[in-house]
Image (tube, grey):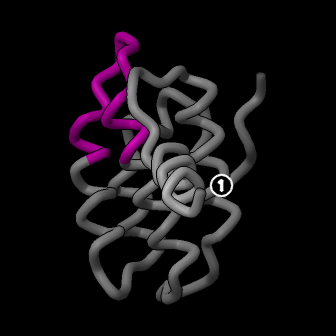
């Protein structure tokens, strides 16, 4: 029984398949919500950067988010970052979602 619970938890944590603009922008807004002022430390930011890297990498729309995904994955594996580095790593995602990182939210 414990093995089934572990499998279910692991399967839901590792999503696969293509993602939509809404999923990418929801994760982008989630990263924005976790940003602070100055240098950024702490697991929530790096976890959010990794989550955004994952959905951006699986995005199959006309926009190419692969460069952003690669940069975000690198940030998620680091131990510090800052707002400028995160903004530079999300330029294509910012265009897709219609606002800069940390300013505003994506409109439906």
14 with respect to 67 (left or right): right
Q: Which of 108 and 51 is in front in this view?
A: 51
Residue 83 appears at what percent x and percent y? 48, 71
Q: Answer with the quarter of the image where residue 34 lies.
A: bottom right
Q: How many marks?
A: 1
Mark 1 crowd level (few <14, some 14–19, many ≥20, 10 Å Cα):
some
The answer to whether 59 is drawn above or below residue 8 in the figure is: above
Residue 59 forms part of the magenta stretch: yes
Seen at 55% across and 47% down, the residue is 8
Residue 58 appears at what percent x and percent y? 35, 29
37 with respect to 94 (left or right): right
The answer to whether 6 is drawn above or below residue 66 in the figure is: below
107 with respect to 84 (left or right): right
User: Magenta stretch?
Assistant: 54-69
Farthest top residue?
A: 62
Residue 77 forms part of the magenta stretch: no
Residue 18 appears at what percent x and percent y? 41, 21
Q: Which of 47 and 102 is in front in this view?
A: 47
Q: Is mark 1 on a helix, strand or loop?
A: helix
Which quarter of the figure is the N terminus placed in? bottom right
**What residue is pinned by disc 1?**
30
Seen at 77% across and 28% down, the residue is 107
Q: Nearer the viewer, residue 103 or 19?
A: 19
Seen at 47% across and 24% down, the residue is 19
Which quarter of the figure is the C terminus placed in? top right
The answer to whether 67 is drawn above or below residue 96 in the figure is: below
Seen at 53% across and 72% down, the residue is 45
Residue 2 appears at what percent x and percent y? 57, 63
């Amino acid at each position: 029984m414990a093995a089934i619970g572990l499998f279910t938890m692991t399967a839901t944590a590792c999503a696969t398949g293509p993602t939509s603009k809404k999923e990418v922008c929801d994760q982008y807004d989630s990263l924005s919500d976790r940003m602070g002022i100055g240098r950024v430390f702490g697991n929530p930011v790096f976890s959010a950067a990794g989550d955004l890297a994952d959905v951006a990498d699986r995005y199959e729309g006309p926009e190419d988010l692969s460069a952003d995904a690669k940069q975000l994955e690198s940030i998620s594996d680091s131990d510090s970052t800052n707002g400028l580095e995160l903004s530079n790593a999300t330029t294509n995602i910012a265009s897709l979602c219609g606002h800069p990182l940390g300013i505003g939210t994506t409109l439906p």
